[in-house]
Amino acid sequence: MIDVFISCVPPSSTHQAGLRIIKPKDRKPFIGKYKTSKAKLEENSMLILFREHRPEKPFDCPIALDVTYVYPWRSAETKKNKALGIIPKDTIPDCDNLAKGLTDVLTTALFWTKDSKISDLRFRKFWGDEPGIRLVVYPLEAAQSQPPVRSQEKQQSDQRPPQQDQRQGSSRRRRRASSTQSVAPVAPVDQKTRSALETAGSQASSSPVGSSCPTVSTPSVPSQDDLFRQ
């Protein structure tokens, strides 16, 4: 494991900043680096700083890389922020571009055989009282490289047979459909109508069955002899 802090001003130029389209004579243009560019100079300075901290043998296994850049305070930094000692840096350059430049330097310094060995990478940048670069490199074991364990509920849902999931899904759809069916609104009953209904109900319950129905006389139908007789 390598855990080192180098007191310096972290680079502000990125890997992309040093790239230029070079157009040589009688040849096709290509993307390369100027040897006198600021990015190239900072890359050489980083190489000198980290070379003495490289391992005896380059890592040839999955590794984790944890990098922290602490930049010096800005000239217009407030006293409130300085009192905190360190605050996150949310300005350029971007973390991904800085990480690319650093991993290229460490690959050249033989920290590992090739940068594809980095399977766990974390990069942070801050403003702070103590400018510098902290670098932590360690090999990953099999237990550390396992993906995070999902919740028990998710695991149980994955272990259920597919038929059970289909039945539960269909029952949920039926319940959802029944709960979303439209119900016709009931018109409100005013006080006068309610009183009339209550009075009619009380009269019907107090009178014998059939007493409230009027008697209708059925007219007699004349016979055929009566019709001829008329």
Image (cartoon, rainbow, N blue to C red):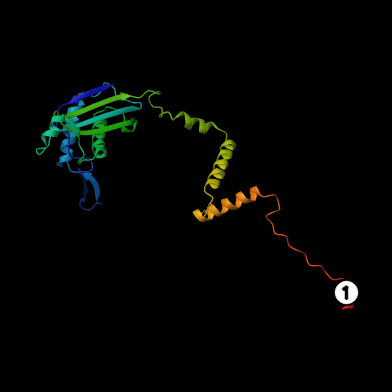
What residue sits 25% from the left and 38% below the top?
A: 95
Residue 18: name its quadrant: top left
What residue sits 60% from the left and 49% below the top?
A: 202
Dot 1 corresponds to which residue? 226
Quadrant holding the C terminus: bottom right
Residue at far left of view = 75
What residue sits 54% from the left and 47% below the top?
A: 177
Front residue of 217 and 90: 217
In what element is the residue under mark 1? helix
Residue 9: name its quadrant: top left
Could you tell me residue 131's position as x and y percent? 15, 30
Q: Is residue 212 left or right of residue 45?
A: right
Could you tell me residue 186's position as x and y percent? 52, 53
Residue 63: name its quadrant: top left
Front residue of 86 and 93: 86
Could you tell me residue 123's position as x and y percent? 26, 33
Looking at numbered disc 1 in the image, what kind of residue is underneath it?
A: Asp
Q: Is residue 143 left or right of residue 25?
A: right
Quadrant holding the N terminus: top left
